[in-house]
Image (spheres, grey):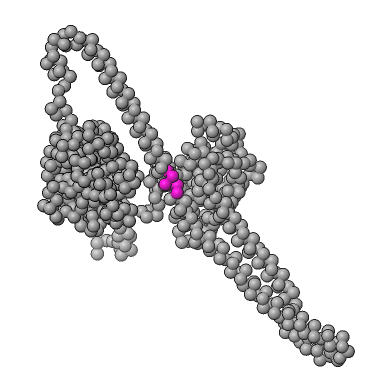
Amino acid sequence: MYGIKKGHFSYFIKIFLCLFIFSITLNNSLYSAKLKPVKIGVLATHSRYESMQKWSATAIYLTRNIRGYQFEIIPLLFNEIDSALQQNKIDFLISNPSIYIEAEIKYDADRIATLKNLRAGRPFTKFGGVLFCKANRSDIQTITDLEGKTFSAVDKNSLGGWQAAWLTLKKAGIDPFEDFKSIRFTGSHDQVIYDVRDGRVDAGTVRTDALEQLSEKGEINLTDFRIFPHNQHLQTEKFPFLHSTALYPEWPFAQLPKTSKELAQKVAIALLQMPMNSEAAQNAHYAGWSIPLNYHSVRTCMQALQIGPYAELNRVSIWQFIVQNKLLSIASGLFLLIIIGFLLGTMRLNSRLHRAKEKIVQELHERKQLEVKLLQAQKLEAIGQLAAGIAHEINTPSQFINDNLTFLQDSFLSINTVLHRFKETKEQYQQGRDVTANISALEELIERSDLDFLETEVPDALQQSLQGLDRIRKIVKAMKEFSHPSGNEQTAADINQAIENTIIVSKNEWKYVAELKTELDPSLPAVPCFIDEFNQVILNIIVNASHAIQDKVGNSGEKGTITISTKKRDETVEIKISDTGTGIPKEIQHRIFDPFFTTKEVGKGTGQGLAIAHSVITQKHHGTLKIESEPGKGSTFIIELPLRLEYNKIMEQ
């Protein structure tokens, strides 16, 4: 009718659908690429690793509920927050109330929500501090008895773990820095409790509910402690936790001046709508967020203590002192000012250097601890993943050994019956009796027992059983050598044998999707290394290779190839592990060794395996780990390890 044939019309529809699907895919790709990064600074009260574990789900929740933005958690220690605010490194801040007040005054931060802390199955938007000692201390009955005693607290910047208690002590007429024998800041609420429990200090203070939490875990008994109750505790019956101080609003979620009001409003709405049973709330052990509370009480506390932005309150400056003592200033002011300036500059420089050194040492310590934890987690995860596969590998030879033993048992009964009849016939013959009937019966029994068949099959069954036992022995030996700890020092090891052991224990991971080939140099010398950690590196790369091949072949039934080779170079040993998997795009190849970066789907990869492998090879062995990859064709990981142990020791020094 319109000059378009039916076949042409169908053709046009197909073209239209293809263009429509392509436009949707292109729009989704462009949308993902245009996500704006939003950084949320979070006070790390214990460590950066624990802070990331606790708050990462909150960032994921906001990313999913606010289109166009990618939220990221930035863990900050107490002494790092001011620098992050000053340099505009973060867009939002989650911290304790006293740090927020300082950020509000110095950097115009503004709260948009208040945390609803989840304790004992109920939400609470307030907290305070609790002062306590051992219950058997007859010499400490009231707060005033703490004078001259040793004391433990969390941190100078901790509201619940120090500042609230400090104000209560001040109101009781005690200056802790003058009247206490000593004050110890542990950095941990639990450590303060243990210090008091074990008698390392006479008394201490932590935030409310810290004692109850340890009691619920069975770590302490509340009856072992004497609590100094707040003088208005009867008016706060709705607050069920032991407390010695006034109550203050919980942690705020604050926006910073550079953050747009539109984004802040979206974040506030998303936080207020967060369900109590959401993954974000459960990970951080809170019940969601409420509208922002009034933090005037926190401001009043800091003013009374003259801390934070009020540290200079009611203090006379050096210039005021000079003005008030003009005669003394005229006589010696210039000379004294030069000396004081020089000393102050020197002290300030030393203080900065000391703080920088402490920060570096602390970060290195935390990094090493994190690497140890991640490596241990990887080992446990690997053992768990390999257990089922190794059990299957052992079960197969065990099954045919069992079948062969059953066959040999039946065969022995048949042969034994023939031998028994032959023995009877022999005895009758020796006695001179007629054995014609016995011989006929013996021939019939031999034919029925099929001795010719047994003569052929029994040796084969024995040989198969011995081969099966040898296979089990090799699997057990490989697993034992794979999991054997290296100790604290490098030892010369057979790299080829270590690779073969790892191939055996990981066989169930790759045998269904790949053929594994080895080209191991038989003349390879012993290599100094931490052999268990080297095994873990090879295992991680083999597992990654099998996953890449699986992603490529899918359920087609085809198999890819994994090739492992070793070669001696001048002063190093080179190990190459190649696969025919999907390969890695060039634009992300430089990130594959970054912690927590992964190209796998959510739930299938943590992004830690290759990061740990890179750390083990480059830092612990002073070698190199590189990758060569082409999308659609596969990847090759190249490891080089130094051959000389002396070189490694020099590098470590």
x and y percent of residue 285 in the render?
26, 53
Residue 427, by quadrant, is: bottom right
x and y percent of residue 209 in the render?
24, 51
Q: How many marks?
A: 0
Residue 595, by quadrant, is: top left
Residue drawn at (50%, 59%) of the image? 387
Of residues 559 and 308, the one drawn nearer to the viewer in this rendering? 308
Of residues 279 and 586, the one drawn nearer to the viewer in this rendering? 279
x and y percent of residue 346 in the render?
30, 19
User: Where 650 falls versus 462 (above or below)?
Assistant: above
Residue drawn at (56%, 54%) of the image? 480
Of residues 639 and 10, the one drawn nearer to the viewer in this rendering? 639
Q: What's the magenta bit mostly, secondary-structure-wise?
A: helix
From the viewer's perspective, tell me whether residue 418 is left or right of residue 19. Answer: right
Residue drawn at (75%, 77%) of the image? 452
- The residues colored magenta run 371-376
From the viewer's perspective, tell me whether residue 523 is left or right of residue 616. Answer: right
Q: Residue lying farthest front?
A: 138
**Whether residue 73 is visible:** no
Q: Is residue 377 magenta?
A: no
Residue 359, by quadrant, is: top left
Q: Residue lying farthest right?
A: 432
